[in-house]
Image (cartoon, helix red, strand yellow):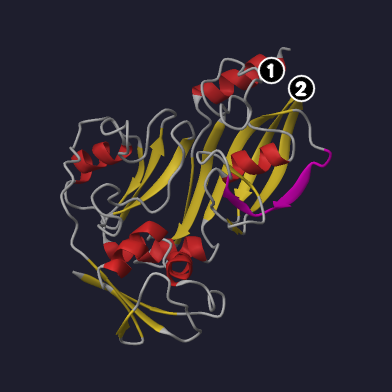
């Protein structure tokens, strides 16, 4: 078993334990924290803490993480485009259409299945065996760069960078229409939709701070090619923020229903650049991925319209 020790900051003081710890330890979900609290695996200043306990600034939190329980996730010999790899991490260029980790309806053919074959036991266990090594995720139909941790120390170090907004993540997308400005910032909180739980939306209710910096790279008749730099990393953030501005991502079946998909299956969104401080060497590393064929083909089509 592994112990994770945290000190409550002013930012989360007053929050319920499960909500506050999900912010302090982004590698753990609220449901994971609730389960750990129910099992007595979380202490607050030395005493067992319940999931509804209130956090106070300076509280000492100790989370005892259980050893991963085998889930039956199988290693599969699926080709991977590995951009970089060492003993602590690897950077993968995920193709469009590949699910990151097993879930209902997708137990095989995922990035995790491929990683288990490539890395064997050399993946961090913080997220359990369903999501070994996965520090952050990108959606099934989003392509591009993803970082994977090979050990728990690297995982925590990288997750801290994401939490501190020092992790570079730049995406490119094609959206419908034209923006009024060529460069701007969307600062709008994101939470789950009240009636459609599979959708996220801009809302003040039960939401999290979300910031996306957008730059227009090129304009075409009825479309724009944009670059998005994430300051935060909320679920569907770019897809939600562009739709909120009235210009959803081309091909997005969730946030642009009824619009022509222009021959793109799923959103035209690519994780182009990723940058981080290496957890062992302290060196800043940055990687870039070329635009994939589906993306360049769309640019070619709309440039001729």
Q: In terms of depth relative to the viewer, which is nearer, 225 or 30?
A: 30
* Residue 20 in sight: yes
Residue 294 part of the magenta-drawn span: no
Q: Is residue 280 left or right of residue 96?
A: left
Q: What stretch is highlighted in magenta?
A: 180-193
Q: Which mark is residue 10?
A: none
Q: Residue 222 carries which label?
A: 2
Residue 284 rendering spot, x and y as whole percentages:
47, 61
Tag nearer the camera, 1 or 2:
2
Q: In terms of depth relative to the viewer, which is nearer, 92 or 262?
A: 262
In the rendered image, the vertical position of residue 126 relative to residue 93, given as above or below: below
SS label for mark 1 = helix
Name which quarter of the figure residue 247 lies in.
top right
Label 1 CA crowd tier, 10 Å (few <14, some 14–19, many 20+): some
Residue 76 rendering spot, x and y as whole percentages:
20, 33
In the rendered image, the vertical position of residue 251 relative to residue 236, given as above or below: above
Q: In terms of depth relative to the viewer, which is nearer, 119 or 31?
A: 31
Residue 32 rendering spot, x and y as whole percentages:
34, 59
Q: Earlier in the sequence, mark 1 or mark 2?
A: 2
Residue at 55% x, 62% y is 165
Name which quarter of the figure residue 59 lies in.
bottom left
Position of the C terminus, as image quadrant, is top right
List the residue tagged with mark 1. Answer: 302
Residue at 61% x, 32% y is 255
Residue 228 rendering spot, x and y as whole percentages:
63, 44
Q: Is residue 278 left or right of residue 56?
A: left
Mark 1 touches mark 2? (CB < 8 Å)? yes
Residue at 37% x, 61% y is 28
SS label for mark 2 = loop
Q: How far apart are marks 1 and 2 (CA)?
A: 8 Å
């Amino acid at each position: 078993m592994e112990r994770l020790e945290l000190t409550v900051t002013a930012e989360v003081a007053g929050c319920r334990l499960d909500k506050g710890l999900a912010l302090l330890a982004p590698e753990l979900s609220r449901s994971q924290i609730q389960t750990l609290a129910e099992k007595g695996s979380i202490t607050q200043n030395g005493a067992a803490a319940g999931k509804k306990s209130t956090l106070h600034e300076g509280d000492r939190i100790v989370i005892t993480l259980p050893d991963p329980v085998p889930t039956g996730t199988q290693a599969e010999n699926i080709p991977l485009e590995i951009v970089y790899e060492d003993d602590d991490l690897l950077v993968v260029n995920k193709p469009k259409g590949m699910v990151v980790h097993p879930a209902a309806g997708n137990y095989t053919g995922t990035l995790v299945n491929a990683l288990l074959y490539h890395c064997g036991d050399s993946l961090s266990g913080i997220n359990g065996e369903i999501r070994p090594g996965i520090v952050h995720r990108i959606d099934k139909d989003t392509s591009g760069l993803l970082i994977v941790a090979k050990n728990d120390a690297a995982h925590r170090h990288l997750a801290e960078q994401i939490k501190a907004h020092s992790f570079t993540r730049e995406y490119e997308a094609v959206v419908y229409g034209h923006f009024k400005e060529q460069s701007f910032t969307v600062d709008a909180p994101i939470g789950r939709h009240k009636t459609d739980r599979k959708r996220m939306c801009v809302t003040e209710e039960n939401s999290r701070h979300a910031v996306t910096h957008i730059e227009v790279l090129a304009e075409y008749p009825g479309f724009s090619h944009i670059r998005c730099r994430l300051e935060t990393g909320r679920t569907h953030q770019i897809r939600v923020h562009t739709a909120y501005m009235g210009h959803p991502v081309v091909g997005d079946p969730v946030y642009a229903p009824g619009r022509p998909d222009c021959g793109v299956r799923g959103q035209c969104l690519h994780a182009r650049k990723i940058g981080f401080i290496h957890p062992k060497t302290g060196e800043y590393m940055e990687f870039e991925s070329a635009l994939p064929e589906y993306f360049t083909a769309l640019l070619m089509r709309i440039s001729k319209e």
